[in-house]
């Protein structure tokens, strides 16, 4: 079959004409990302199948290293393509070879975006609709899966590598890629229009404090203050909405932990990157197909207390584990750090109270609030602005109780008074309120001297 015939056949199979709104054929409803039909779809399918037939069980030979497998696949791929009589340019031949290699060795059409260091998130809204996040902006791309089956096979490959599963009886799953990137998949019947996949990419070279200062997330004075708080073993919660950069900030704060301390990290999907030598990483586990064997974050927090930790770092508190975390903070395990979803520092306290109640323990609200106020020292609130940048907007001290209310004191606030420039970037900055924290004595007892100039009052333009 000639190339022209292949293109015509592909268009007939998909019901695509060349009379799209922009003069190009596209598949799917108007709400999906516009993309041209791949003229080499049939060719790639045929070459792919021939490659599988030629390699057979060698693809699953445990004695082959990853580099040997890649070399074998690419060598066989070139041999199969060279035998095909379809006229191809050098560029088309290289692209087809790369796409087929990505499908066999990696995650198919996701691979180009997973390799791109500027892409921070990949969102699959259906087999023929892929979006990415770049520089804080969500953009549609031309990549696509062949069909729903192709997307499901890719999801199965991802979750199987970390010992998890996704099927009709368990249609939601959280997993991670080998590099630590966070993956969430949800399939029919819960996903009405087809399987959905979201990949939060994990940087092989994680952002450090200097990077966050360069991005404008925090100022040098704030970075120095937070370093002193971590070294002084304060209990810190990093809060914010989805995509606000909580985990990135948590990673940066964890870099301040002294290298001679024993640190235990607890996560749903391991993604923290601590560079200290004495780090023990724990990961929760979902139930098996029989509904047994589940290990929750709460179980791991309780177990970590028997492992002689100097620090406990929990990736995110989202359920009854809040009670165990508070008790750990109140029983000598100072210096713990975690994240929580909340919009303001005051909301953090309400969220923690609610999660403690989820433990099913019959405690009066005042007792819970006393636990919260004595356990948490500092709240670092972070937000994602409309231009895609992430900024710390509050650094708030938990002072104590007044009656039945937990009192807070803002030490740093983001000044929004200067508005935005022509490109939508905020002209504001994180400024000191001029108030001194009341935990200074605790830091002094830990041998940490705080730079008082960080608290110099700065004028707020309202």
Image: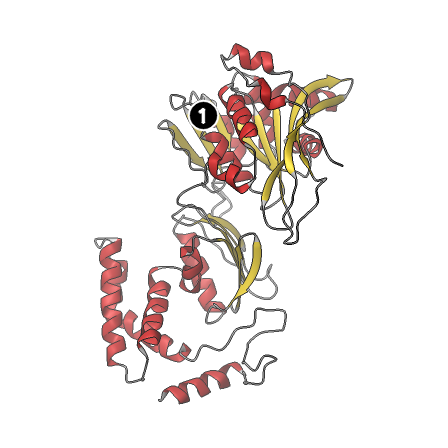
Q: Is residue 304 above or below residue 148?
A: above
Which quadrant of the rendered structure holds the N terminus? bottom left
Residue 34 or 212: which is nearer the viewer?
Answer: 212
Q: Is residue 92 above or below residue 192?
A: below
Q: In this view, does 5 lie to the left or right of 268?
A: left
Dot 1: within a 10 Å radius of its alpha carbon, few (fewer than 14), some, or many (20 or more) residues? many
Q: Quadrant of residue 190?
A: bottom right
Label tally = 1
Q: Where is residue 51 in the image (x, y as percent from the top left)?
A: 28, 71
Residue at left offset 61%, top offset 16%: 439
Q: In this view, does 204 lie above or below 447?
A: below
Q: Can residue 48 be seen in this view?
A: yes
Q: Can residue 296 be seen in this view?
A: no
Report the residue marked by disc 1. Answer: 257
Q: Quadrant of residue 104?
A: bottom left
Q: Is residue 32 left or right of residue 65?
A: right
Residue 416 or 29: which is nearer the viewer?
Answer: 416
Residue 319 or 179: which is nearer the viewer?
Answer: 179
| Image colouring | secondary structure
Q: What element carries label 1?
A: loop
Q: Where is residue 223 in the image (x, y as percent from the top left)?
A: 53, 29
Residue at left offset 49%, top offset 37%: 267
Q: Where is residue 120 in the image (x, y as percent from the top left)?
A: 50, 51
Which quadrant of the rendered structure holds the C terminus? top right
Q: Which residue lies furthest to the right in this view?
A: 403
Residue at left offset 56%, top offset 28%: 221
Residue at left offset 42%, top offset 56%: 116
Q: In this view, does 304 lie to the left or right of 352?
A: left
Q: Position of residue 21 (x, y in %)?
A: 61, 80
């Amino acid at each position: 079959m000639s190339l022209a015939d292949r293109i015509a056949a592909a268009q007939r199979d998909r019901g695509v004409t060349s009379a799209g709104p922009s003069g190009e054929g596209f598949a799917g409803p108007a709400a999906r990302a516009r993309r041209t039909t791949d003229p080499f779809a049939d060719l790639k399918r045929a070459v792919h199948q021939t490659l599988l037939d030629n390699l057979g069980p060698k693809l699953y030979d445990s004695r082959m290293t990853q580099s040997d497998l890649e070399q074998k696949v690419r060598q066989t791929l070139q041999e199969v393509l060279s035998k095909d009589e379809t006229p191809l340019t050098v560029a088309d031949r290289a692209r087809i070879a790369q796409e087929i290699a990505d499908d066999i060795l990696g995650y198919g059409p996701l691979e180009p975006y997973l390799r791109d260091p500027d892409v921070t998130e990949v969102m699959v809204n259906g087999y023929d609709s892929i979006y990415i996040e770049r520089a804080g902006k969500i953009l549609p791309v031309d990549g696509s899966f062949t069909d729903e089956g192709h997307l499901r096979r890719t999801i199965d490959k991802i979750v199987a590598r970390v010992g998890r599963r996704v099927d009709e009886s368990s249609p939601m799953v959280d997993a991670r890629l080998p590099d630590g990137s966070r993956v969430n998949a949800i399939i029919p019947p819960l996903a009405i229009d087809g399987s959905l996949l979201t990949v939060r990419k994990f940087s092989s070279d994680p952002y450090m404090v200097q990077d966050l200062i360069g991005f404008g997330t925090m100022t040098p004075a704030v970075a120095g203050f937070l370093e002193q708080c971590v070294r002084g073993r304060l209990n810190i919660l990093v809060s914010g909405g989805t995509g606000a950069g909580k985990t990135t900030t948590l990673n940066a704060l964890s870099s301040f932990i002294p290298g001679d301390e024993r640190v235990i990290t607890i996560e749903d999907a391991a993604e923290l990157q601590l560079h200290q030598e004495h780090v023990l990483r724990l990961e929760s586990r979902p139930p098996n197909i029989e509904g047994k064997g589940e290990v929750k974050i709460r179980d791991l927090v309780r177990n970590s207390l028997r492992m002689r930790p100097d620090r406990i770092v929990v990736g995110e508190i989202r359920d009854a584990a809040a009670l165990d975390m508070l008790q750990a903070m109140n029983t000598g395990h100072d210096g713990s750090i975690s994240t929580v979803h909340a919009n303001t520092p005051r909301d953090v306290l309400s969220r923690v109270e609610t999660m403690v109640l989820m433990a099913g323990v019959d405690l009066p609200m005042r007792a819970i609030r006393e636990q919260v106020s004595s356990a948490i020292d500092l709240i670092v609130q972070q937000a994602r602005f409309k231009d895609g940048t992430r900024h710390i907007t509050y650094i708030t001290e938990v002072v104590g109780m007044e009656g039945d209310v937990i009192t807070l004191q803002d030490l740093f606030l983001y000044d929004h008074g200067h508005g935005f420039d022509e490109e939508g970037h905020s002209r504001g900055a994180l400024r000191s309120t001029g108030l001194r924290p009341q935990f200074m004595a605790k830091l002094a007892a830990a041998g940490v001297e705080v730079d008082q100039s960080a608290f110099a009052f700065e004028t707020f333009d309202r």
